[in-house]
Amino acid sequence: MVFRVYVTSNEVPETALEMVRKVAEVRINPAYGTPSKETLLKEVTDIDGLFCNITEKVDAPLLDAAKKLKIVASMSVGFDHIDLDAATKLGILATHTPGVLTEAVADETLGLMLAVSRRLVEGDRYVRDGSWKLKWSPMLMVGRDVYSKTLGIYGLGRIGIAVAKRAKGFGMRIVYYDAFRNADAEKSLGIEFRSKEEVIRESDYLSVHVPLLPETRNSISTKELEMMKPTAYLINTARGGVVDEKALIEALRTGRIAGAGLDVFEREPVDVDNPLLKMKNVVVEPHLASGSIESRTAMAVLAAQNLVAGLKGEVPPNLVNKQVLERRRT
């Protein structure tokens, strides 16, 4: 039996593609960027495996059109772009790539904290555009310290823990909220469990690390932002939908909070007219938190491992919809 696989991006590292080519015929989207909905609907009709990214909406109509599809292997930690209920009903495995991007995202989180609080991007522009006129000035572009401040972590998964480890090196006090308390992390890292409201109120830096689920969508909104210190910063390297963007814009516009470091947005790519892009107290990135060569290669390899296992009738190492095992396609 010859398996067929469609890869939605032509930028997947060759190391991962070679793994898939050993067991299947591989078709790759020749164009840069995300294939159109029409292209996807056409390409999935005869495939056994789909190698995709968070940019593709793998919804019920697409899954239904893929009559032979056995597995969706997403090169991402998040899986909110996949209709898991539809996949499970159709017996299609859905997988993701957790763990391998933890350290890269944690690095980026600390980078955003430093960039926005110490005005690094703003300072870079200040020098480049010729605004720097005095040799030195006591209060020129002063920012706020990270050292010894309180970091609030909203969601203590792998990435939240990795961020906490880094923050300890900055002498930060760390409080966290998660649906599940982690006594081991509290003991080993000296971090403190608090209610969500207490974490928000106490934080000098509030870092978001929860997945985008129905219960977490817009879970940082007007009420939560009004609880924050006016000197506090919001950092989001999780999902744009966790933070109510309109509420955040208003909080920043009115000085309700000091600033924000954002790697993700409600809509991506972000509209160039988005008010967040005009604010000096906001540092933005184009969803780059996992964007190291090492991390992206590891993600691709793990996605390939998941895909190959699913095609061969094995249980993929990172299966999301485990209940599908009872009705998977053969």
Image (tube, helix red, strand yellow):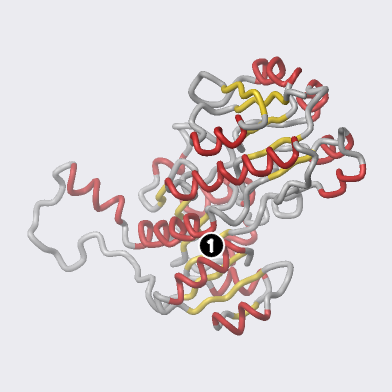
Q: Nearer the viewer, residue 225 or 285?
A: 285
Q: Residue 176: x and y, percent? A: 61, 72
Question: Residue, x 80% and y 46% (percent of image)?
Answer: 321
Q: Is residue 187 above or below residue 19?
A: below
| Residue 194 image point, x, y percent | 65, 77
Instruction: Write the residue at 72% across / 21% down.
Output: 44
Residue 186, picture quadrant: bottom right
Whether residue 111 is situated above or below residue 199 in the rendered picture:
above
| Residue found at the very far right of the displayed protein | 326
Decide: is 285 above or below 200: above
Foreground residue among 84 and 216? 84
Which quarter of the rendered picture does the N terminus lie within? top right
Q: Quadrant of the C terminus?
A: top right
Q: In the rendered image, which residue does mark 1 sit on? A: 207
Observer-nearest residue: 249 or 277? 277
- Picture coordinates of residue 246, whole percent (x, y): 58, 45
- Tell me the crowding category of disc 1: few under 14, some 14 to 19, or many 20 or more residues within 10 angstroms, Cα based: many
Does dot 1 land on a helix, a strand or a loop? strand
